[in-house]
Amino acid sequence: MEKPEDDPVNHPTHYTNRQHECIDEMIAIFGKEAVIHFCICNAWKYRYRADSKGKHDEDMKKADWYINRAMELKNELHYDWIEERR
């Protein structure tokens, strides 16, 4: 089986080297609401340090990925409060 090329933003190999992606296991274990909060915090972290690691564009794309994932989960739960915090 051919190993997929590493996608450091959408599917980093260090999060996809098991049966399920890490974020999917987190949803199964902690629930969607907790993962929404995790995603918001992770997006903040990536934006906070974007200028510190020499990977500004990649970190901003990662932040966007986490915001988008939080929005997807929010829509699945029909939450309105995330829009107010954006």
Image (cartoon, rainbow, N blue to C red):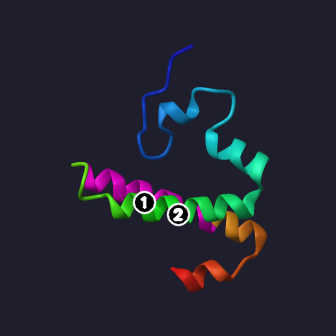
At which x and y percent is residue 1? 57, 13
In the rendered image, which quarter is residue 84 located in?
bottom right
Which mark identifies residue 41? 2
Q: Residue at x 47, y 62 (%)?
A: 43
Whether residue 44 appears in magenta in the rendering, the answer is no
- The x, y position of residue 80, in whole percent, is 69, 82
Cα distance, mark 2 to mark 1? 6 Å
Q: Identify which residue is drawn at 60% across, 59% down.
A: 38
Element type where label 2 sits in the image: helix
- Determine contact: label 2, label 1, CB under 8 Å: yes
Instruction: Count residues near mark 1 (Cα–Cα under 10 Å), then give few for <14, some for 14-19, many for 20+.
Output: some
* Position of residue 23 in the picture relative to residue 6 (left or right): right
Q: Which residue is mark 1?
A: 45
Q: Is residue 54 above or below residue 63?
A: above
Residue furthest bottom as drawn: 84
Establish if 53 lies above or below 72.
above
Tell me the magenta residue range: 55-71
Residue 77 percent across, percent down from the top left: 77, 69
Asked if the magenta segment contains residue 62, the reply would be: yes
Left or right of 53 on screen, residue 29: right
Q: Main secondary structure of the magenta part?
A: helix
Q: Residues within 10 Å of mark 2 (few under 14, many from 20)?
A: some
Amino acid type of the residue that numbered disc 2 sits on in the rendered structure: Cys
Q: Picture coordinates of residue 19 (x, y %)?
A: 69, 28
Under mark 1, the amino acid is Lys
Which element is circle 1 on?
A: helix
> Residue placed at 68% from the left, 34% from the top?
20
Residue occupying the far left of the picture: 54
Above or below, 8 against 41 in this view is: above
Q: Residue at x 50, y 31 (%)?
A: 14
